[in-house]
Image (spheres, grey):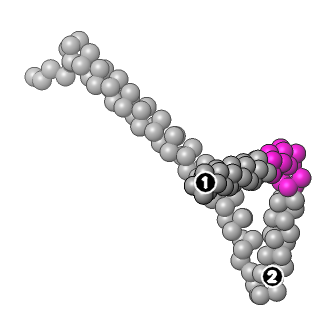
Amino acid sequence: MENNEITISEAKRVTAELKASILKLDALNQDVVNNITQLQDLNSKMKDYTSLLSRFEFTDEKEMTLNYASYLSFISKKIDELSKNSSLQKIERIIGISEKIINLSIVKVSLIVAVVVTGINFLISK
């Protein structure tokens, strides 16, 4: 006669193995959920990029020229906005003043050198 009954220690061992398996499955499930979330994010980004790239799929040269002209117009507006920026104008003014100071300093150094050379020539000629 076989004994089909399990002992308490065997039941505890099987229960522990089942709990460990459940924990492993839970961890795997969490990894799968994280991967699905990442795939959804990538898919969303890819849709954004493909809609952007579709703007550059031209059917003919005329369409390409029109879109390129629109792009250049947009860029020129942005450049105009930047040039009107007050901080940029202040920087340009500072650079202009710096250039004037440098030019004045060069003139002063040239005059000093000319006076010194003239003085040396005057002393040598005596």
Name the one closer to the observer, 116 or 13: 116
- The residue that appears at 77% across and 87% down in the rendered structure is 61
Q: Residue furthest left?
A: 1
Amino acid tagged 2? Thr
Q: Residue furthest top?
A: 8
Instruction: Tell me the magenta residue range.
Output: 81-97
Residue underneath mark 1: 126
Q: Which mark is residue 22?
A: none
Name the one closer to the observer, 39 or 97: 97
Rendered view: 98 above or below 51: above
Is 11 left or right of 54, judged from the image as shown?
left
Callout 1 environment at 10 Å: few (<14), some (14 to 19), or many (20+)?
Answer: few
Please name the predominant secondary structure of the magenta segment in the image: helix
Which of the 4 image quarters holds residue 10?
A: top left
Which of the 4 image quarters holds residue 17?
A: top left
Q: Is residue 90 magenta?
A: yes
Is 78 left or right of 44, judged from the image as shown?
right
Residue underneath mark 2: 65
- Which element is circle 2 on? helix
Quarter of the image containing the N terminus? top left
- The residue that appears at 35% across and 23% down in the rendered structure is 19
Quarter of the image containing the C terminus? bottom right
Callout 2 environment at 10 Å: few (<14), some (14 to 19), or many (20+)?
Answer: few
Amino acid tagged 1? Lys
Name the one closer to the observer, 59 or 115: 115
Q: Going from the N terminus, do you reach mark 1 or mark 2 first? A: 2
Confirm whether residue 88 shows in the render.
no
